[in-house]
Image (cartoon, rainbow, N blue to C red):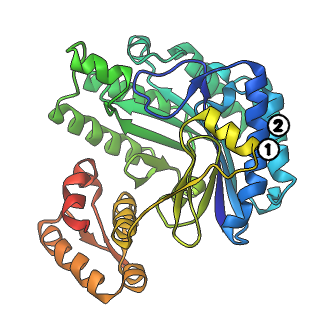
Amino acid sequence: MAGLYIHIPFCHGKCAYCDFYSLGAPVESLLERYAGAVVAEWRMRRSELAGSPITTLYVGGGTPSALPPRLLEAIVRGVMADGVSLGDLQEFTIEANPEDLTPEWLAGVRALGVDRISMGVQSFDDALLKTVNRRHDSARAVEALEILRRSGMNYSADLIYGLPGQTLEQWRGDLGKLLDFEPPHFSAYLLSYEPGTPLHARLARGEVSEAPEQLAEAMYAALCEQSAARGYRHYEISAFGKPGREAVHNSSYWNYTPYLGLGCAAHSFLPDGTRMFNPPNIMAYLRDIEGGLCPAETDEETESDRLNDYIITSLRTDTGLALDFLRDRWGLETFQSVGQAADPFLLSGHLTMTAAGFRIPECHWLTADSILRELIL
């Protein structure tokens, strides 16, 4: 089985914290070219999955809900006509922003086979939303969540904590307000100030400041406490699902399932372990596809790189690192080296044993980087 990711690199506006490749909505002719190019890339590259059936489909961005519905339909129908079957899909997700989510839009994507929505709420505080240049306000987020709840559709909502000026009580309030909707799934991310973003520039100018470590830890503790009280499984550092509602496609990034990424700036992980990426340049992407060339470049990884990828991604999850898989994939010597590096953390409680291997306990996930630095080779 394999996943298929389709990247839509267009947004109504750029959020202050976002470092993903995205563009303001261009003229319709460019959008049409892009939709055609994505379908052409699929036909060009589907053999790279070596016959693995597509079991998850994820349309992300950017903001896929910013794409005209007829072009979104053209992409989905084009992919479905050439080797992707709705009957094989365990999950078909599309990302949306609250300002785009209407009953009519939702009905349109459901007609395409979409059975899961991932929506970026980020906060219910209007001042905090303005600080990070979100286009919606709290009232619109609540309205969109009501639409999703009434629809009975599977969905996920995102929140961010550690926003500039955000207090612990504000964070508790945001979290409680979202959980009152009882979403099947939600994600919560500690704000990261990425170089090249407007928010990072404001940080450098002293206009905003990062959340102090003690506050970030208190926010994370509140997140773990409130989600557990509402019956959510905290199955990845930032991901929470009701039992059976964990994100199937996103889990492929953490459990070594292959996936193919289509579109400008998309990444792929092929069945033979090769990682590939499409450069983040839409005009170069269109020129390649329209000229009959594959836009993807190989990410030149060593076996150590691949091992480190596995260590980092597996230890982001509550299932953790599988020692049998590590030994079978990288050999006894590597197995022993990782085990020796893990011993001090097992003794200190920063790692715990599982039936399959070991994992980082939930209480240490927020500071997982300090453990991972010692385990990677």
For label 2, the residue is: 73
Left or right, residue 232 beside residue 219 = right
Which label is found at residue 76?
1
- Which is nearer the eye, 216 or 261? 261
Look at the image and tell me whether residue 245 can be seen. Answer: no
Left or right, residue 313 beside residue 369 = right
Residue 153 spot, x, y in % from top left: 70, 41
Identity of the residue drawn at 82% across and 37% down:
73
What amino acid is found at the position of numbered circle 2 in the picture? Glu
Query: Is label 2 in a helix, a strand or a loop?
Result: helix
Query: Is label 1 in a helix, a strand or a loop?
Result: helix
Residue 84 figure quarter? bottom right
- Seen from this angle, which residue lies furthest front? 291
Identity of the residue drawn at 57% across and 35% down:
281
Residues at marks 2 and 1 touching, judged by CB atoms closer than 8 Å: yes
- Residue 99 lies, with reference to residue 339, above or below; the image says above
Identity of the residue drawn at 46% across and 48% down:
240
Q: In what quadrant of the picture does the C terminus appear? A: bottom left
